[in-house]
Amino acid sequence: MNDTSPPPIDTAYLRDVCGDDRELGVELFGDFETETRANMNRLRGAIAAANPVEAREAAHGIKGGAGSLGFTEISQCAARIENAARDGSLDDAPAQLQQLTEALARLGSAFPKISWD
Amino acid sequence: MPSATPMNNESAKILVVDDSQVIRKTLNKRLQAQGYAVTEANSGAEALELLKKEAFDLILLDVIMPEMNGNETLQEIRKLFGPAQLPVIMSTAMDQSDDMVVSFRLGASDYVTKPINFPVLQARVATQIALKRSADRLQREIQDRRQAQEQLKLANESLERRVAERTADLQKAKDDMETQAEELARFNSELQDFAFVASHDLQEPLRKIQAFGDRLKSKFADALSDTGRDYIARMQNAADRMSELVSDLLSFSRVTTLSRPFERVDLGEAAQAAFSEFSSEVKAAKAELELGALPTIDADRSQIRQLLVNLIDNALKFRRPEVPPRIRIHAEIDGENCRLTVEDNGIGFDSKYTDRIFRVFQRLHGRDEYSGTGIGLAICRKLVERHGGSIDASGKPGEGASFTVTLPLRNTQSEPESNPPSNA
């Protein structure tokens, strides 16, 4: 992660979606984790199998879910893979996958620290 | 922050179609908070299934989905519902503008980009639902009017049908009546022709019977016994009687076959002339005529004369023995009619026979008591009716009779009803 990387969570957007409803935020985060776990597995398999179509769909799924909850860093990371895959290129995909994995880890530690008050 | 106060969206129903559960749920929460009723579908196929079972006011449709994507789903939706019936807002990533061009061509109503800007989404959803509501109202109004028009048309058709039926009934009744009237007129005309021809042609053999009877009597009387001469006398009486009948019958039929155009007729002069025909009977019976002031009317001169002759003849014939006949003829004007009365001081009759005396060959007395064929008054009635008038009689046995003829003063009818047969 370098200095220009966006923060893992756009809290203003998340608050726009959930208000101060912590329970809803936690529920949506849980849904996101489940959905993303499946998409990550799919994405890894697609990169290993050099399947850009499959990789694009998986990356798109991660991008949308993250975007809808204000997880900006992950959303942008996934968008880079999606765009490259759309152009048929998976050359940078392993490195991007690594970045995505790290971003997910950052989100995992940042989310519980959100102030809902 | 989502508002806790739902807007007045009257539970408009929105179908959210997205393959991401997270996105469906976030949209659902936000839209529910606005007062909308939200249903979720995780694929185009599920959305189409729901649309077959439930009515929605709006669809929020993700463009990029596995298997059936948003545009393919939209295409299927538009086969079921037009843009005015069901607005569809597409949701797409910011960088997918090519897809949006396709979406609009396929009938998308609007689009939002992801990540969703919720105020923008709410504004677009509200606009589309308001448009749909107007379209619905317009559609209902069109249907109401169409229904009203249909009812009006049905009512009109029913009315037209009833009028047509009634018209047909009336036309048929009129046709039937005209047919009957024509048949009656033809029948009447044939009957008159028949009466005229029959009575006219009967005279010829009758004259031969009379002539040969006369010759038998004058030339061979000596050769016959008293019984033979009595037979001839009886035969001649019968022939004379028949001649009288035929002659009267001919007169009766001539009322119509020999009618003439109407002209101005002075009833006073006509009565005087008729009375003068009976000069010998008048003298013998010492009869008196009292003639009042009579008007001038439109009539067939010869027929009026015959009418008066018949009535005077009647008064003289049915006189009381030993009582000189007094005949009084007078008239009064009643509006557009003239009422002419012929009164006598004769034997009179019972008023219950009034109808009978005007019928052909009807007699109240035996032939040996009073001469005549019983046709005179029938001719009178026919003459009067031909002039558009009427005749009535009253009387008491032994106290005289009174005949009243009502005739129009002016009568435009000037054409004879029919012409006599050519051999008349």
Image (cartoon, rainbow, N blue to C red):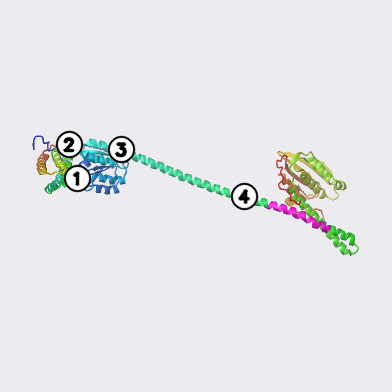
Residue A17 rendering spot, x and y as whole percentages: 19, 38
Looking at the picture, which amino acid does disc 4 mark?
A: Met
Residue B130, image quadrant: top left
- Alpha carbons under labels 3 and 2: distance apart: 28 Å
Q: Is B270 on the left-hand or right-hand side of B140?
A: right
Chain to which mark 1 belongs: B
Q: Do tag 2 and tag 4 residues touch (Cβ < 8 Å)?
A: no
Determine the residue located farthest toward the left in the rendered image: A2
Determine the main secondary structure of the stretch shown in magenta: helix
Q: Earlier in the sequence, mark 1 or mark 4?
A: 1
Q: Do tag 3 and tag 2 residues touch (Cβ < 8 Å)?
A: no
The residue pinned by badge 4 equals B177
Q: Is residue B197 magenta?
A: yes
Q: Is A2 on the left-hand or right-hand side of B281?
A: left
The residue pinned by badge 2 equals A13
Chain to which mark 4 belongs: B
Q: Earlier in the sequence, mark 1 or mark 3?
A: 1
Q: Is residue A45 magenta?
A: no
Looking at the picture, which amino acid does disc 2 mark?
A: Tyr
The residue pinned by badge 1 equals B21
Q: Do tag 1 and tag 4 residues touch (Cβ < 8 Å)?
A: no
Chain to which mark 2 belongs: A
Task: Sort mark 3 into few (<14), some (14-19) or many (20+) by Cα contacts within 10 Å.
Answer: some
Looking at the picture, which amino acid does disc 1 mark?
A: Gln
Residue B222 rendering spot, x and y as whole percentages: 91, 63
Secondary structure state at the residue bearing disc 3: helix
- Alpha carbons under labels 2 and 4: distance apart: 96 Å
For the image, the number of numbered tags is: 4
As drawn, the label of residue B130 is: 3
